[in-house]
Amino acid sequence: MLWALWPRGLASKGLPLLGVVLLRKREKRGPQWSHCRRETHPYYDLQVKVLRARNIQGKDLLSKADCYVQLWLPTASPSRAQTKVIDNCSDPEWNETFHYQIHGAVKAPTSCPPRIQNVLELTLYDKDVLGSTELSLLLFDLKSLKPGQPHKHTFLLNQQDSQELQVEFVLENSQAPASEVITNGVLVAQPCLKIQGTLGKDETAPQQKYGSRQIRLAVPGAYEKPQLLPLQPPVEAHPPDTFTFHVNPVLRSRLHVEVGEKLTVLQSDPSAELEAQTSSLGEGGILLSSLALGQEKQRLLAVGKGQEVPLRVKAEMSSGDLDLRLGFDLCDGEREFLDKRKQIVSKALQQVLGLSQAPASDQVPVVAVLGSGGGTRAMSSLYGSLAGWQELNLLDTVTYLSGVSGSTWCISTLYKDPAWSQVALQGPTEQARARVCSSKTGAVSTERLQYYAEELKNLESSSHSISLIDLWGLLIEYFLYQEENPAKLSDQQEAVSRSQNPYPIYASVNVRTDVSGDDFAEWCEFTPHEVGFPKYGAYVPTKLFGSEFFMGRLLKLWPEPRICYLQGMWGSAFAANLDEIFQTAGFNLGFLDWHRGSVNVTDDHQKLRDPMRLRTRLFTPQGPFSQAVLDIFTSRFTSAENFNFTSGLCLHKDYVAGREFVAWKDTHPDAFPNQLTPMRDSLCLVDGGLAINSPFPLILLSQRAVDLIVSFDYSLDAPFEGLCLGRLSLCYYGNNRAIRFPSGVSQTLCGGQRSPSARRFWLHCWASSSLFGLLSLLLLLDPTQPPVIIRPQPVKLKSAPTRERGGSEKEAVGSSREGWQRECW
């Protein structure tokens, strides 16, 4: 027990907080799936028969609806399928059957547990002259089906008009052999089929002066886009053209081949530009399932009358280890850091608390220091806060250092020095101040503009999608360094290799380009070792961030982005949409709810209910005018688009059990698995402050087992306003995800007491050199939750260097936003 080590004079030292943490009962709760595992599961054949619809009301005023149904099952089909169009009919009848092969994705007998979340989308359209109008969208979880038991389902589309859609499902065991998958309980990685081949020379292709033949190869559902290769007469010195595709074998795709001829049309005017026209000469295809694995075969593919294309094709199955990590445990690098850091923290606690001997490893608390967003104000303030902790010899007691937005600029700059916490911070602080306060005219000089153009061009050459955030990162590079900074995030591994500094965690959020960050934001953490989503338990090595992944396999390696581009992403508050901007200003755009489509639960069979099954939902969209209004207020001005390293992975059938998901709310985006991040081509990463202006969600992960959180708030709001609003956001975030937000002093001060006396108590509490007054509060806190100390910006307690403010002056300062604003340095 540490009571024996606790000196009598500890209270007088004014540092009881860390001692309290040492005495707390520590309950470490790890995630249910710490590591991924391999499992083997069968395939099933699914038959979907669209029967009929009844009482459909179309959008045309002069005629009845021209209906057709579109089906989409992205885990089993590379493209959408649809029925034929029934013209001018309110009761269309199709009786069309569609076939799918799904991988252990439905609720089968216990001997064959499902593993992948398969949700079929059925969309009813009314075809018009200029396009089609979406009438209703149904999402049906196939987990309710059982093999060998046909199920006929009537979906109610509109109860008032008795509109309905009838569909019949038949599920059977497949003859295809079972395959092995890798899963962490949320994501599932299936085997990846790789198709590679070479294009032979066309012996019959004539030499043409004004035209050339080319071949277009495509595999629906593959990661790669369609590829164009020239089809030329044989040339000895020219190597054969090659092509490669990666695809999920469950999709049963085809290698589609089309031969076209590109003709150059001469103009009558010699000075006019030549025009090119392409005409199709024929097309054909190869069913990928017909290719023998591991064997390269020569094929003459007929693509039309008298047309043949020579191909050499080879199919390989990638079912080995993944190039990303699926799991909810900490990475090896972070765990090694923690083991070494405990020894440093133990010695620091012995010195700070005046203990007779250093605490044992299992008694060393994990302390996290958080910095909020706030641009250069947050950056400069965090410099001062860390310098203060260093003066109090507390910096070595910190295990994690995390921030969002402007705080990340301070942290990432400090970590250029692998020993920054072991040297006085006055030097780095003065250097940062000189650069931030210097003239910024050089940022728009001719030489600098040329540098920006060249860097963005190099970035684009690596297939990176250029955005305004990339330019913003280059501007931040000038503000912070005033020269090219070649540093990369993975370089910071040297700064934590001996655990000599706290472990840095930089925060960003993955958002939608048309959804507010309050409604959907997935936290993404950046550390020296890994980048990933705690929500999905998917991480890639930091050196591989920016490379191309598909189905968990690395397809193309690109250079790791320089840290200036990450700084631009972490601090991209201007990526907010109009809805978020108005909310920040205190205006609630409630009228937008009138223009959003409605989502209703249509489950009417209790026997189909399963706690892990998504309920059937009916989405009824609004008209084009409402959609235009939503686009204006919710479309994001810009975002940092990056390659999606979760692309091609599927959701586990029980993903809804993950506490990071809000799928139990039928209107939340998490309840639409076909639209979640693994199904998207790219990530849209922006400033984490657009969701919560502090990186609490990353620090509150159970696997980090943090005992004490010290949060520095550098928001522009007055401290009590920002504190209470921030706590409401955190409570909303935690309650939706079954995460209990830690208790803390803020509960006492935000419980409605916002009187001047409460403000004065707060000021005295934090301006005083002694924190003993908080000891009694902390002893009463929940021992299973880490206490949170939220530190607002300091108040100017002096009107002049030698004169204290009077009571009325303090009151005026405390009630004004300007009074709460911290001086930069």
Image: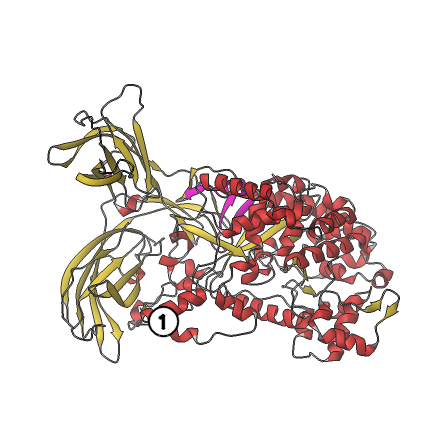
Q: Residue at x 71, y 49 (%)?
A: 432
Q: Please indicate whether residue 189 sits to the left or right of residue 492 in the image.
A: left
**Depth check, front residue: 305 or 534:** 305
Q: Is residue 538 magenta?
A: yes
Q: Which part of the image, by quadrant, shows the N terminus?
A: bottom right
State whether residue 684 is above or below residue 812. Answer: above
Residue 154's place in the image compared with 194, above or below, is: below
The residue lying at 14 percent from left, 70 percent from top is: 88
* Quadrant of image for the C terminus: bottom right
- Image x and y of residue 376, in percent: 66, 56
Disc 1 marks which amino acid? Ser
Viewer-proximal residue, 360 or 723?
723
Q: Position of residue 356 (x, y in %)?
A: 83, 51
Looking at the rendering, the stretch of residues picked out in magenta corresponds to: 530-549
Q: Nearer the viewer, residue 5 or 408?
A: 408
Q: Position of residue 509 (x, y in %)?
A: 52, 56
